[in-house]
Amino acid sequence: MLQWLLLMVTQMTRTLHPSVTSWRDDSGMNNAQAQRQNGDHGAVPSIATHAHGITLPGQIQRSAEVQRLEAVWAVHQDEVREAQRLRYRVFADEMGARLTPPAGTPAGLDVDIFDAYCEHLLVRTVETADAPAQVVGTYRLLTPMAARRVGGLYMDSEFDLLRLDPLRPRMVEMGRTCTDAAWRAGGIVLMLWSALAEFMLRNRLDITLGCASVPMRDGGHLAASVWNQLRQSHLTAIELQVQPRLALPVDELQGDLDVEPPALIKGYLKCGGKLLGAPAWDPDFGTADLPMMLDLADLPAAYRRRFIRA
Protein backbone atom coordinates (compact mmCIF):
# COMPACT_ATOMS: atom_id res chain seq x y z
CA MET A 1 0.00 0.00 0.00
CA LEU A 2 1.61 3.19 -0.87
CA GLN A 3 1.41 6.87 -1.72
CA TRP A 4 -0.38 9.36 -4.04
CA LEU A 5 -0.77 12.48 -6.13
CA LEU A 6 1.62 15.40 -6.68
CA LEU A 7 0.03 18.79 -6.21
CA MET A 8 1.95 21.92 -5.37
CA VAL A 9 0.72 24.03 -2.52
CA THR A 10 1.10 27.78 -2.46
CA GLN A 11 0.73 29.79 0.73
CA MET A 12 -3.02 30.20 0.49
CA THR A 13 -4.08 28.31 -2.64
CA ARG A 14 -3.16 25.13 -4.45
CA THR A 15 -1.91 24.66 -8.00
CA LEU A 16 -3.96 21.76 -9.27
CA HIS A 17 -3.14 18.65 -11.21
CA PRO A 18 -5.64 18.32 -14.10
CA SER A 19 -7.36 15.35 -12.45
CA VAL A 20 -7.76 17.03 -9.06
CA THR A 21 -10.60 19.30 -8.04
CA SER A 22 -9.21 20.46 -4.73
CA TRP A 23 -8.82 24.10 -3.80
CA ARG A 24 -8.15 25.93 -0.59
CA ASP A 25 -9.59 29.25 0.49
CA ASP A 26 -8.52 31.62 3.24
CA SER A 27 -10.30 29.53 5.84
CA GLY A 28 -7.85 26.68 5.20
CA MET A 29 -10.63 24.38 4.05
CA ASN A 30 -10.43 22.52 0.77
CA ASN A 31 -13.44 22.03 -1.46
CA ALA A 32 -13.95 18.38 -0.56
CA GLN A 33 -14.20 19.30 3.09
CA ALA A 34 -16.44 22.26 2.35
CA GLN A 35 -18.85 20.07 0.42
CA ARG A 36 -19.03 17.63 3.31
CA GLN A 37 -19.60 20.47 5.77
CA ASN A 38 -22.51 21.79 3.74
CA GLY A 39 -24.08 18.36 3.48
CA ASP A 40 -26.57 16.65 5.76
CA HIS A 41 -24.50 15.48 8.70
CA GLY A 42 -27.25 14.45 11.05
CA ALA A 43 -25.68 13.42 14.34
CA VAL A 44 -22.48 12.16 12.77
CA PRO A 45 -19.46 14.37 13.64
CA SER A 46 -18.58 16.63 10.73
CA ILE A 47 -15.60 15.46 8.71
CA ALA A 48 -15.44 18.75 6.85
CA THR A 49 -14.10 21.21 9.35
CA HIS A 50 -10.45 20.22 9.59
CA ALA A 51 -7.93 21.16 6.89
CA HIS A 52 -5.25 18.51 6.88
CA GLY A 53 -2.58 20.35 4.95
CA ILE A 54 -2.31 17.68 2.26
CA THR A 55 -3.34 17.22 -1.32
CA LEU A 56 -6.77 15.70 -1.68
CA PRO A 57 -6.86 13.44 -4.73
CA GLY A 58 -10.48 14.02 -5.74
CA GLN A 59 -12.18 11.32 -7.76
CA ILE A 60 -9.20 9.28 -8.85
CA GLN A 61 -10.67 6.24 -10.51
CA ARG A 62 -8.84 3.00 -11.01
CA SER A 63 -11.25 0.61 -12.66
CA ALA A 64 -10.93 -3.15 -12.73
CA GLU A 65 -12.96 -3.85 -15.83
CA VAL A 66 -13.57 -7.53 -15.19
CA GLN A 67 -14.81 -6.95 -11.67
CA ARG A 68 -16.33 -3.56 -12.48
CA LEU A 69 -14.75 -1.86 -9.48
CA GLU A 70 -13.40 1.63 -8.93
CA ALA A 71 -11.35 3.27 -6.17
CA VAL A 72 -12.43 6.81 -5.23
CA TRP A 73 -11.85 9.23 -2.38
CA ALA A 74 -14.84 10.27 -0.30
CA VAL A 75 -15.78 13.88 -0.98
CA HIS A 76 -19.28 14.10 0.48
CA GLN A 77 -20.54 13.11 3.91
CA ASP A 78 -22.84 10.52 2.36
CA GLU A 79 -19.82 8.75 0.88
CA VAL A 80 -18.11 8.61 4.26
CA ARG A 81 -21.30 7.19 5.72
CA GLU A 82 -21.22 4.41 3.14
CA ALA A 83 -17.76 3.50 4.37
CA GLN A 84 -18.92 3.67 7.99
CA ARG A 85 -21.88 1.47 7.12
CA LEU A 86 -19.63 -1.19 5.60
CA ARG A 87 -17.35 -1.00 8.63
CA TYR A 88 -20.33 -1.58 10.91
CA ARG A 89 -21.42 -4.64 8.95
CA VAL A 90 -17.94 -6.15 9.08
CA PHE A 91 -16.84 -5.17 12.57
CA ALA A 92 -20.10 -5.25 14.53
CA ASP A 93 -22.40 -7.64 12.66
CA GLU A 94 -19.77 -10.08 11.40
CA MET A 95 -17.01 -9.88 14.00
CA GLY A 96 -19.12 -8.97 17.02
CA ALA A 97 -17.18 -5.83 17.95
CA ARG A 98 -18.56 -3.65 20.73
CA LEU A 99 -18.57 -0.24 19.09
CA THR A 100 -18.95 2.97 21.09
CA PRO A 101 -19.85 5.72 18.60
CA PRO A 102 -20.48 9.32 19.70
CA ALA A 103 -23.90 10.03 21.15
CA GLY A 104 -26.51 10.60 18.48
CA THR A 105 -24.78 8.57 15.77
CA PRO A 106 -27.38 6.93 13.48
CA ALA A 107 -27.78 3.20 13.88
CA GLY A 108 -25.69 0.96 11.67
CA LEU A 109 -22.62 3.23 11.43
CA ASP A 110 -19.13 2.73 12.84
CA VAL A 111 -18.00 6.23 13.83
CA ASP A 112 -15.23 7.47 16.11
CA ILE A 113 -13.42 10.74 16.78
CA PHE A 114 -10.72 10.03 14.20
CA ASP A 115 -13.11 9.87 11.24
CA ALA A 116 -13.46 13.65 11.13
CA TYR A 117 -9.73 14.03 10.55
CA CYS A 118 -9.18 11.22 8.06
CA GLU A 119 -9.28 10.80 4.31
CA HIS A 120 -11.51 7.86 3.37
CA LEU A 121 -10.86 5.59 0.39
CA LEU A 122 -13.78 3.64 -1.08
CA VAL A 123 -13.60 0.68 -3.42
CA ARG A 124 -17.03 0.32 -4.94
CA THR A 125 -18.83 -1.40 -7.75
CA VAL A 126 -19.44 0.69 -10.83
CA GLU A 127 -23.04 1.86 -11.07
CA THR A 128 -25.06 0.28 -13.87
CA ALA A 129 -28.59 0.65 -15.17
CA ASP A 130 -29.56 -2.37 -13.07
CA ALA A 131 -27.70 -1.71 -9.84
CA PRO A 132 -26.46 1.30 -7.87
CA ALA A 133 -22.83 1.60 -6.81
CA GLN A 134 -21.98 -0.37 -3.69
CA VAL A 135 -19.01 0.18 -1.38
CA VAL A 136 -17.21 -3.15 -0.96
CA GLY A 137 -13.90 -2.05 0.53
CA THR A 138 -12.56 0.87 2.52
CA TYR A 139 -9.85 2.26 4.72
CA ARG A 140 -9.05 5.65 6.21
CA LEU A 141 -5.79 7.57 6.32
CA LEU A 142 -4.62 9.90 9.06
CA THR A 143 -1.85 12.28 7.94
CA PRO A 144 0.82 13.76 10.23
CA MET A 145 -0.86 17.18 10.42
CA ALA A 146 -4.27 15.64 11.06
CA ALA A 147 -2.77 13.43 13.77
CA ARG A 148 -1.41 16.50 15.52
CA ARG A 149 -4.83 18.14 15.41
CA VAL A 150 -6.69 15.18 16.82
CA GLY A 151 -4.02 14.57 19.46
CA GLY A 152 -2.24 11.52 18.12
CA LEU A 153 -2.67 8.34 16.14
CA TYR A 154 -5.27 5.67 16.78
CA MET A 155 -2.34 3.32 17.38
CA ASP A 156 -1.20 5.50 20.27
CA SER A 157 -4.14 4.12 22.24
CA GLU A 158 -2.91 0.54 21.75
CA PHE A 159 0.88 0.87 21.70
CA ASP A 160 3.67 2.93 23.19
CA LEU A 161 5.09 4.48 20.00
CA LEU A 162 7.87 6.47 21.66
CA ARG A 163 10.57 4.97 19.45
CA LEU A 164 8.70 6.12 16.34
CA ASP A 165 8.51 9.79 17.39
CA PRO A 166 11.28 10.91 14.99
CA LEU A 167 9.33 9.37 12.09
CA ARG A 168 5.95 10.99 12.81
CA PRO A 169 6.33 13.83 10.25
CA ARG A 170 6.75 11.18 7.54
CA MET A 171 4.05 8.72 8.62
CA VAL A 172 0.49 8.19 7.50
CA GLU A 173 -1.67 5.86 9.57
CA MET A 174 -3.99 3.45 7.80
CA GLY A 175 -6.93 2.12 9.76
CA ARG A 176 -10.41 0.61 9.76
CA THR A 177 -9.50 -1.49 6.71
CA CYS A 178 -12.23 -3.91 5.69
CA THR A 179 -13.88 -5.54 2.70
CA ASP A 180 -17.35 -6.92 2.11
CA ALA A 181 -17.56 -10.67 2.73
CA ALA A 182 -18.60 -11.30 -0.88
CA TRP A 183 -15.58 -9.43 -2.28
CA ARG A 184 -12.61 -10.76 -0.35
CA ALA A 185 -10.40 -11.48 -3.30
CA GLY A 186 -6.98 -10.21 -4.27
CA GLY A 187 -8.31 -7.56 -6.64
CA ILE A 188 -9.71 -5.30 -3.93
CA VAL A 189 -6.61 -5.62 -1.76
CA LEU A 190 -4.43 -4.61 -4.71
CA MET A 191 -6.63 -1.58 -5.40
CA LEU A 192 -6.42 -0.50 -1.77
CA TRP A 193 -2.64 -0.83 -1.74
CA SER A 194 -2.18 0.90 -5.06
CA ALA A 195 -4.28 3.87 -3.95
CA LEU A 196 -2.24 4.11 -0.76
CA ALA A 197 1.00 4.22 -2.76
CA GLU A 198 -0.20 7.10 -4.91
CA PHE A 199 -1.45 9.01 -1.88
CA MET A 200 1.88 8.77 -0.11
CA LEU A 201 3.85 9.87 -3.15
CA ARG A 202 1.59 12.82 -3.86
CA ASN A 203 1.84 14.03 -0.30
CA ARG A 204 5.54 13.27 0.12
CA LEU A 205 5.07 10.72 2.86
CA ASP A 206 7.13 7.57 2.86
CA ILE A 207 6.00 5.50 5.83
CA THR A 208 2.64 3.92 6.53
CA LEU A 209 1.69 2.08 9.67
CA GLY A 210 -1.37 0.49 11.15
CA CYS A 211 -2.79 -2.40 13.12
CA ALA A 212 -3.44 -5.72 11.40
CA SER A 213 -6.13 -7.54 13.33
CA VAL A 214 -6.32 -11.27 13.97
CA PRO A 215 -9.69 -12.64 15.22
CA MET A 216 -9.68 -14.17 18.69
CA ARG A 217 -12.67 -16.47 18.43
CA ASP A 218 -10.35 -19.32 19.42
CA GLY A 219 -9.17 -17.49 22.52
CA GLY A 220 -6.04 -16.06 20.90
CA HIS A 221 -4.15 -19.19 19.85
CA LEU A 222 -4.25 -18.20 16.17
CA ALA A 223 -2.90 -14.74 16.95
CA ALA A 224 -0.14 -16.12 19.17
CA SER A 225 0.89 -18.53 16.42
CA VAL A 226 0.94 -15.78 13.78
CA TRP A 227 3.13 -13.67 16.08
CA ASN A 228 5.54 -16.52 16.81
CA GLN A 229 5.79 -17.34 13.13
CA LEU A 230 6.38 -13.80 11.87
CA ARG A 231 8.71 -12.61 14.63
CA GLN A 232 11.32 -15.02 13.32
CA SER A 233 11.58 -13.38 9.91
CA HIS A 234 9.74 -10.04 9.81
CA LEU A 235 10.33 -8.29 13.14
CA THR A 236 11.84 -4.83 12.71
CA ALA A 237 15.06 -3.64 14.32
CA ILE A 238 14.85 -3.12 18.07
CA GLU A 239 15.23 0.67 17.79
CA LEU A 240 11.84 0.80 16.03
CA GLN A 241 9.96 -1.75 18.11
CA VAL A 242 6.85 -0.71 20.03
CA GLN A 243 5.20 -2.05 23.17
CA PRO A 244 1.51 -2.98 23.51
CA ARG A 245 -0.39 -1.19 26.26
CA LEU A 246 -2.62 -4.23 26.83
CA ALA A 247 -0.52 -7.15 25.65
CA LEU A 248 -1.97 -10.40 24.42
CA PRO A 249 -0.62 -13.05 26.84
CA VAL A 250 1.11 -15.00 24.08
CA ASP A 251 3.19 -17.07 26.50
CA GLU A 252 0.00 -18.52 27.98
CA LEU A 253 -1.44 -19.49 24.59
CA GLN A 254 -0.71 -22.26 22.12
CA GLY A 255 1.65 -20.52 19.74
CA ASP A 256 2.84 -23.35 17.51
CA LEU A 257 -0.18 -23.84 15.25
CA ASP A 258 0.41 -24.17 11.51
CA VAL A 259 -1.31 -20.97 10.42
CA GLU A 260 -1.42 -18.58 7.49
CA PRO A 261 -1.38 -14.85 8.26
CA PRO A 262 -4.50 -12.81 7.35
CA ALA A 263 -4.58 -11.11 3.94
CA LEU A 264 -3.76 -7.63 5.26
CA ILE A 265 -0.65 -8.88 7.04
CA LYS A 266 0.46 -10.80 3.96
CA GLY A 267 -0.06 -7.63 1.92
CA TYR A 268 2.22 -5.67 4.24
CA LEU A 269 4.90 -8.35 4.15
CA LYS A 270 4.85 -8.79 0.38
CA CYS A 271 5.36 -5.04 0.03
CA GLY A 272 8.38 -5.08 2.34
CA GLY A 273 6.54 -4.27 5.56
CA LYS A 274 7.80 -5.09 9.02
CA LEU A 275 6.25 -6.21 12.28
CA LEU A 276 6.84 -3.61 14.99
CA GLY A 277 6.25 -5.78 18.03
CA ALA A 278 4.03 -8.17 19.93
CA PRO A 279 0.24 -8.03 19.53
CA ALA A 280 -2.05 -5.91 21.63
CA TRP A 281 -5.41 -7.23 22.80
CA ASP A 282 -8.41 -5.17 21.75
CA PRO A 283 -11.29 -6.41 23.93
CA ASP A 284 -13.88 -4.18 22.23
CA PHE A 285 -13.18 -5.60 18.80
CA GLY A 286 -12.31 -9.07 20.05
CA THR A 287 -9.02 -9.08 18.12
CA ALA A 288 -5.30 -9.25 18.60
CA ASP A 289 -3.73 -6.29 16.81
CA LEU A 290 -0.28 -6.62 15.31
CA PRO A 291 1.57 -3.32 14.73
CA MET A 292 2.82 -3.12 11.13
CA MET A 293 4.93 -0.56 9.28
CA LEU A 294 5.92 -0.13 5.64
CA ASP A 295 8.67 2.18 4.39
CA LEU A 296 8.39 2.88 0.67
CA ALA A 297 12.14 2.57 0.42
CA ASP A 298 11.69 -1.15 1.16
CA LEU A 299 9.09 -1.69 -1.56
CA PRO A 300 10.24 -4.47 -3.92
CA ALA A 301 10.84 -3.40 -7.51
CA ALA A 302 7.98 -5.52 -8.85
CA TYR A 303 5.47 -3.83 -6.55
CA ARG A 304 6.97 -0.41 -7.20
CA ARG A 305 6.30 -0.86 -10.91
CA ARG A 306 2.78 -2.10 -10.20
CA PHE A 307 1.69 0.51 -7.67
CA ILE A 308 3.63 3.65 -8.53
CA ARG A 309 2.93 5.25 -11.84
CA ALA A 310 5.49 7.63 -13.28
Image (spheres, rainbow, N blue to C red):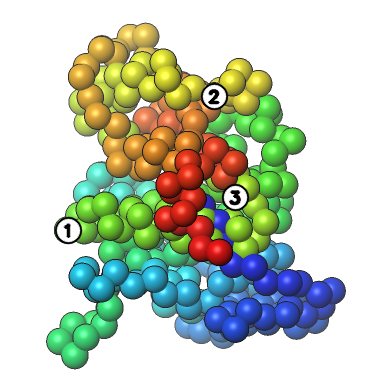
Nearer the observer: mark 3 or 2; the answer is: 2
Label 3, on which residue? 172
Q: How far apart are the alpha carbons under marks 3 and 2? A: 18 Å
The residue nearer to you, when weighing 155 against 302, is 302
Residue ranking furthest to the right: 11
Quadrant location of residue 259? top left
Label 2, on which residue? 236
- Label 2 neighbour load within 10 Å: few <14, some 14-19, many 20+: some
Label 1, on which residue? 182
Q: Mark 1: which amino acid?
A: Ala
Q: Are marks 3 and 2 in contact (CB under 8 Å)?
A: no
Q: How far apart are the alpha carbons under marks 1 and 3? A: 29 Å
**Dot 3: element:** strand
Left or right of residue 28, residue 95 in this image? left
Using the image, tell me which numbered label, if any, was put on residue 63: none
Up-down relation of residue 47 to residue 271 (above or below): below
Q: Mark 2: which amino acid?
A: Thr
Q: Earlier in the sequence, mark 1 or mark 3?
A: 3
Tell me where residue 221 appears, x and y as whole percent.
26, 20
Q: Earlier in the sequence, mark 1 or mark 2?
A: 1
Is residue 139 among the parts visible in the rendering?
no
Q: Mark 3: which amino acid?
A: Val
Q: Which of marks 3 and 2 is nearer the N terminus?
A: 3
- Label 1 neighbour load within 10 Å: few <14, some 14-19, many 20+: few
Up-down relation of residue 152 to residue 233 (above or below): below
The residue nearer to you, when weighing 214 against 186, is 186
Q: Which residue is located at x 77 percent, y 80 percent?
A: 13
